[in-house]
Amino acid sequence: MEFSTLTFLFFFFPIFLFSYFIIKNRKYRNIVLLIFSLLFYAWGEPVYILLMILSIIMNYYFAKLIDKSKSRKLILIISIICNIGLLVVFKYTDFIISIFNFVFRLDIKSTNIALPIGISFYTFQILSYVIDVYRKKVKVQNNIINLGCYISAFPQLIAGPIVTYDVVENELSNRVEDMDNFYIGTKRFIIGLAKKILLANSVGYICDSIFGLSTTLWTFPLIWLAVISYTLQIYFDFSAYSDMAIGMGRMLGFHYLENFNYPYISKSITEFWRRWHISLSTWFRDYVYIPLGGNRVSKKRMCMNIMIVWALTGLWHGASINYLLWGLYYGIILLLEKLLLKKYIDKMPNIFKHMYTIIIFVFGWTIFRLENLSDLLCAFKSLLGFNGFGNLNMLISLGLFKVKYIFYFILAIIFSMKIDIKSNEKVYNVLLIILFIYVISIMVTGSYNPFIYFRF
């Protein structure tokens, strides 16, 4: 189930809110949250609900053993192996088989194991908990219901943000649910829903229409329109989900941290990754890069640490060569900035810094989007003008010259930048209500509504 569906908005979520707020006791509210979170997950993955329950129970006892045992490090290692092992089995088995088949010229059949929704996100949350218990950064959670709420809470279960345990440790038992939080959360949710339905879906349709063509038709203007559209789509798609997750969390008294901070206004790739998917970057920094030695090692070792982190970041997104290439691409760019380019970038006028950054992340999103390497090569050739310039007749035949697509494409570019809009709060609230009604009317028509990060 996705947030941007009528089923969620007018069936699941209202029933949850009624069941949750009619109960006054915190203990029982957490039970309601856990039950509805498991139902939310089971809606799309009825079998894998058992995997979710196993993860909750397993890590509840792992953490308690880490807290009390003299063999703390050994138990931590076992817990990491078990959690990463589950992730590898369900997400990377066929990828590993394909590599073995290629390298050793074998013919092992794929298992075609279905990917549990959100497993990359909740596995990282679980790991942050057991590792922080080991580090004595957080106290062990003795209430399995509370731990279950942390791991499976439906607002951030499917696509984050990745919420480390220390962020919500106190709020699991002592959060404040009041009208102020509910009001703030509702506004944030509406903004996220509008970004998803109006902006992400519109530019996503442009992108998918062009990428759906034969690669022989990927001319210079078409492919640039496609990759810019995808660049806008993935930002509004994912940031919209984060907005909705943060908004719903706030309605329930949770203060999830921000996951995006206008990444497309960045003036370097280093800055871009401080602004994009902040929870993932922070997780890899705290639980992989720093434990590997971070910057406190030799230059050669630091370079290796950065490349390891970015190879893992790429593979975290998907079991495919293009994701690994995408991660390594950014690892190399970030190393170049750190060791060589920074002094030159700092001297550039802001407009050139911005242009440089845009070109880098647009090419990066092209790698991310195209899993087929021959398609990727063709796309790069087209982006550089080697496949001809063609004409715009194809846009007309695809129906992309309609006013709504042009309007939302321009609007997406504008709202990807940081804009300070000052208005009267009452006027703003009225506009939000109108926006919500308009978005619902679009959803009722059953319009194009994919979600990119749903499969990670």
Image: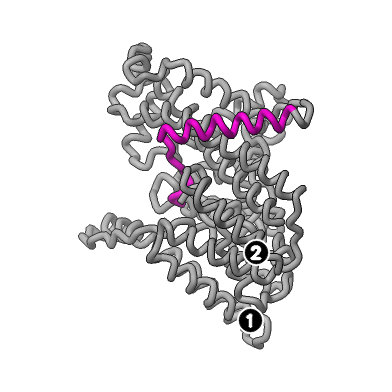
The disc at residue 48 is none
| Residue tagged 1 | 64
The spot of residue 442 in percent (x, y) is 48, 31
Q: What x and y, as percent, mark residue 62?
A: 58, 79
- Residue 340 percent coordinates (x, y): 65, 38
Cβ atoms at labels 2 and 1 below 8 Å apart = no
Residue 337: give x, y in percent of width and height: 64, 39
Local secondary structure at mark 2: loop
Q: Residue at x 64, y 57 (%)?
A: 163
* Rendered view: 440 above or below 50: above
Residue at the extreme left of the image, as rendered: 107
- Extent of the magenta region: 427-456
Identify the coloring: one colour
Q: Which one is in front in this view, the residue at disc 2 or the one at disc 1?
A: 1
Q: What residue is drawn where x is 64% and y is 33%?
A: 433
| Residue 112 in the image: above or below residue 392 | below
- Residue for badge 2: 291
In-image side of 105 versus 285 (left or right): left
